[in-house]
Image: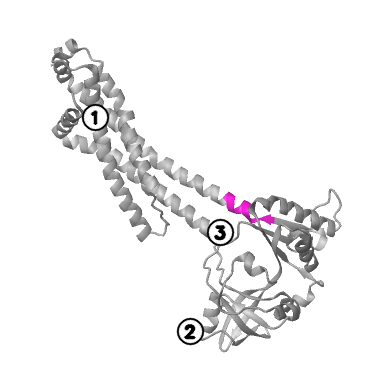
Amino acid sequence: MTLSDVLRTAVFSLRGNWVRSALTSLGVIIGIAAVIVMVSVGQGTQAEIDKLVSGLGSNRLDVQSGAGFGGGGVRMGAGSSLTLTEDDADAIRSDIPEIAFVAASLRGGSQLVYAENNWSSQWQGVQADWFAINSWELASGDGFTSRDYGSGTKSVILGETVRRELFGDEQALGQTMRLGRVPFVVVGTFKSKGQGGFGQDQDDLVVVPLQTARRRLSGANAMPAGAVQQIALGVAEARDLEYAQGEVEALLRQRHKIQPGQDDDFNVRNIAQIVATRTQTTKLMSLLLGAVASISLIVGGIGIMNIMLVSVTERIREIGLRMAVGAGPRDIRRQFLAEAMLISLIGGTLGIAIGVAGALLVGKLGSLPVQLDAQVIGMAAGFSIATGLFFGYYPASKAAQLDPIEALRQQ
C-alpha cells in the first residue's frame, strides 16, 4: 500500500465512528493546550522577574555595616552599627582596580513639604557613582555638580512618585521644598523605574549629596564622623565579581583590624547571586508547570491506546480479510499506526490553536504575565506526533501479529 492509500483508509476508518474519534482526540487537545498555556505563563513570569531583578545590577556588590549590640549584650541586626566610613570607600576606590564605581551612602526618612502638599518618603545621601551603579537617569535638570558633592549644598533630585505627589502638573525644577525643616532646591527629577524586584516603589525617593545628608538632615549629625551606612560597588567585568568580593572583604578586615577567627563587622552582598538564585527558581517553576500540564497529555495518549486496542478487537475479521488478499504485517501495522497518528495530529492542531488563544486571553484578561514562544508551540507539535507514535505502536503491532486464519474465524 502506498502512503496515500494508508492515509485514505485511515480517514475512512475514523469517519466511520467520528464521535468516538473526536472524544479520543479530546485528551490530546486538552493536553497540548494546557502545555502551551502553562509553559507560556511560566516563561512570562520568569521574564517579568528577570526584568524586575535586573534593576538591582548584575555586576554589583553591596557592603553594609555589620551587626551591633544593644542593651544587655543582645546582638542586633545587620546595619545596626555604623562600622563603615567614607575612608573605607576611598580605600576600595584606590586599592582595588577591578572596582569601577564606588558610592558611599546614608539614608533616612523625612516629611517632604511643598506649598500645601506634603509626602513622607525616604531620602538618600549619595556620592557621584551612585547614579551609574543603580542605573538612574534624569528626566529633567542637570543633577548635582562637583561643588554640590564637596560643599554640601541644599540641592535635591526627586523620584517620579515624590514629584507627582508634591508638584502634580506644576514644574518641579528650580522650586524650593523642605525635607523636614531644611529648605532644598530641586535640581533634577528621575526617569520612572516603577516597581522594584522586591515589590517596592523605586520612584518613591529623594536624593541629596552625601555631605548634605550628613550636615543638614535631621539625625545625621549624631552619627560618628565620616560614618556611612552602605557602600555600593560596581565591578567592571562580571568575571571579576567573585575575586573583587574577596579583595573587598580582605581590605576591610585589614582596615578594621579584625583578627583571624573574629567575625566581620560588615556584610558584603553579591547581587549576582541573588539574581541567579531567583532566575533558577523561576525556571524550576516553569518546568514544574510544564510537567503538570504534560500529565493531561499522557492521559490523552492512554486514551488513544485504549481506543485503538478496542478498534483492533472490533476489526479482527477485517484484518484477516486484508491478510488473506495479500496485506502483510507491515501494511497492517502502518494502517493502525496511521489512524493513531491522525487522531493525535488532529488533536494536536486543535490543541495548539486553543492553547495560543487561551494564553493570549490569560495575558489580556488576567494578572499573570504571558510570553508566547514559537519554540514552545513547536515542542507541543512534536509532543503531539510523539504521542501518536508511542501510544499507537502497541495496538498496531498487536494487529499486525494476528494469525489470518484465526482472524477469519472471528464472527
* Element on which disc 3 rests: helix
Q: Residue at x 27, y 43 (%)?
A: 349
Disc 1 from disc 2: Cα separation: 68 Å
Kind of residue at badge 1: Ala
Quarter of the image that includes the C terminus: top left
Kind of residue at badge 2: Asp
Upstream in the sequence, badge 1 or badge 2? 2
Disc 1 from disc 3: Cα separation: 49 Å
Residue 303: in magenta span: no
Residue position for label 3: 54
Q: Residues within 10 Å of mark 3 (few under 14, many from 20)?
A: some
Upstream in the sequence, badge 3 or badge 2? 3
Left or right position of 309 against 229: left
Q: Is residue 217 visible?
A: no
Identify the magenta region. 269-277
Q: Is residue 140 above or below residue 195?
A: below
* Element on which disc 2 rests: loop
Quarter of the image that includes the N terminus: top left
Residue position for label 2: 169
Residue position for label 1: 338
